[in-house]
Image (cartoon, grey):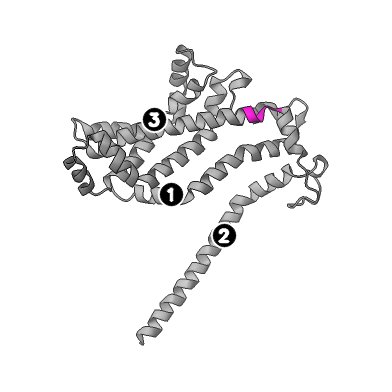
Amino acid sequence: MNPRTSSLNRKRIGWGELFWSYLGLTLLSLMVIFPILVLLSASLKPAGDVFEYPPRLWPQTFSLENYQGALEKAPLLRYLWNTLLVSVGVTLGQLVTSALAAFSFARLNFPAKRALFIAVLATYMVPWELTLIPNYLTISNFKLLDSYWGLVLPFLAGAFGIFLLRQSFMQIAEEYFDAAKMDGATPLQQLRYVALPLARPAIASLALLTFLNTWNMYLWPLIVTNEPTWRTAQIGLRFFLVDQEGSNYGFVAAGAILVLAPTLIAFVLLERAFVRGISLGGVKG
């Protein structure tokens, strides 16, 4: 067989596989995006058109009254601010604690290192519900209910972040650390100037996952906040956009879009680093 013909056949097969792959991914993407489009459409319709039949995906008349009504009925801006502070605080805390612990497990030698690492990973297997009561009692005893500290403290460290960054640090060539040691760098300086810059995709992945998980948290803020001032956006939607007379679904849709928008923006900005960090983090270790 002519080598050129064989090469063309391989290219033709490759393009066919690529086409079906993209078609399947497009269909799956539409399935995921469709509920969001329905929610956005409902938020932009006048109150009388939300339940029109047959339903329209594209509003016949665009209106922002649902957004105005949602902001007037509930202090959503306050709830969004609370959620942003808590999410950023937890994310920064997890990055610091995970980086320090991961570097220790990856590059330092100390007694019982392997046993300690296994113990850390074992905590990841414990369901969150089992730690709910001990965490609540701890926060309550420290008088931290209805406070940002009460919302943030239980999540400042996590086994997943330690594992992800450890895997990333272990993939960095030993020569970089040897050169830093020859220059007299301390372990903290090696972490700051060698490990962290070379592990930016994994760090971005951890930051994005932690931010999204914290932003969407519902049960813990519901338990530790009693005053409306300290409630997060997820709790605010539940308590203030559904009243005794029933639900105004236009308001609910508008509020949900306002709560959803920051997470979509964060994912779009960090999507490439997220995918790269997750793929690199599971290669070695």
Question: Residue beneath label 1, please?
Answer: 273
Q: Position of residue 185 (x, y in %)?
A: 22, 37
Residue at horizontal 32%, vertical 51%?
283
**Number of other residues with Cα within 10 Å of mark 2, as a class: few under 14, some 14 to 19, many 20 or more:** few
Disc 3 vs disc 2: which is toward the camera?
3
Nearer the N terminus, badge 1 or badge 2? 2
Whether residues under marks 1 and 2 lie with C-beta atoms below 8 angstroms apart, the answer is no
At label 3, counting other C-alpha atoms closer than 10 Å, the crowd grade (few under 14, some 14-19, many 20 or more) is some
Task: Give the answer, above or below, for where 191 lies relative to 147.
Answer: below
Residue annotated with mark 2: 26
Q: Nearer the viewer, mark 3 or mark 1?
A: 1
Q: Main secondary structure of the magenta part?
A: helix
Residue 70, can we see it? Answer: yes
Q: Which callout, 1 or 2, points to the residue nearer the camera?
A: 1
The N terminus - image quarter: bottom left
Percent coordinates x, y for residue 179 in the rendering: 19, 45
- Give the Cα separation between the discs numbered 1 and 2: 21 Å
Is 39 situated above or below 247? below
Asked whether, in this view, residue 56 is left or right of residue 30, the answer is right
Amino acid type, callout 3: Ala
Q: Which residues are magenta?
A: 74-78
Q: Which residue is mark 3?
A: 157
